[in-house]
Image (cartoon, rainbow, N blue to C red):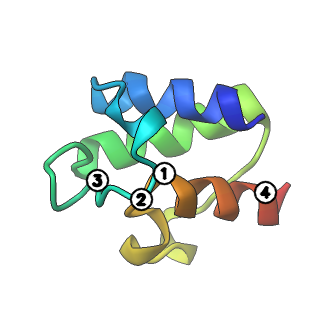
Amino acid sequence: MEERLLNLLADVCEDDIVKTQRNLNLVEEGLLDSLGYTELLVGIEEELGVLLAPSEIAREDVETANKIIALVKSRS
């Protein structure tokens, strides 16, 4: 699951750096904006079957690849 999630994140961010630098702040680095955030949530639901409601997630919860992985694991 982790590899699929990293591949999805790399597609959304349009950069493979998210696979190797998992603590990189995606928002601060300009890799994840609001449209990408929405695309990521939809992709997680479609590819992994995990529903993450935007209203239940704080921006801090999805600012790094490691935090996204932890969030998805906690909800699956």
Mark in the foreground, 2 or 4: 2
Residue 14 versus residue 24: which sits nearer the camera? 24
Report, in whole angstroms, how far the alpha carbon at label 2 lies from the one at label 4.
17 Å
CA gap, disc 2 to disc 3?
9 Å
Q: Earlier in the sequence, mark 3 or mark 4?
A: 3
Q: Tell me which residue sits at (71%, 38%) in the image.
A: 2
Residue 12 lies, with reference to residue 64, above or below; the image says above
Dots 2 and 3: beta carbons under 8 Å?
A: no
Q: How many residues crowd around disc 1 within 10 Å: few (fewer than 14), some, or many (20 or more)?
A: many
Frontmost of labels 2 and 1 is 2
Question: How many angstroms separate mark 2 from mark 1 (CA)?
Answer: 6 Å
Say which mark, if any, is on residue 26: 3
Q: Are marks 3 and 1 in contact (CB under 8 Å)?
A: yes
Task: Check disc 3: other Cα within 10 Å, few if <14, some if 14-19, many if 20+.
Answer: some
Q: Is residue 57 above or below residue 75?
A: below
Instruction: State which mark lies toward you, 4 or 1.
Output: 1
Residue ID for mark 4 = 73
> Does label 3 or label 1 sit earlier along the sequence?
3
User: Badge 1 is on which residue?
Assistant: 65
Q: Residues within 10 Å of mark 4 (few under 14, many from 20)?
A: few
Closest to the observer: 44 or 4? 4
Indicate the position of residue 1 as horizontal and vertical percent values: 78, 34
Alpha carbon distance from label 3 to label 4: 19 Å
- Position of residue 68 measured from the top left corner of the image (x, y, whole percent): 56, 56
The three-letter amino acid code for the residue at tag 3 is Leu
Q: Are marks 2 and 4 in contact (CB under 8 Å)?
A: no
- For the point 67% across and 26% down, the residue is 4
CB-based contact (under 8 Å), mark 2 and mark 1: yes
Separation of disc 3 and disc 1 at Cα?
8 Å
The residue tagged with tag 3: helix, strand or loop? Answer: loop
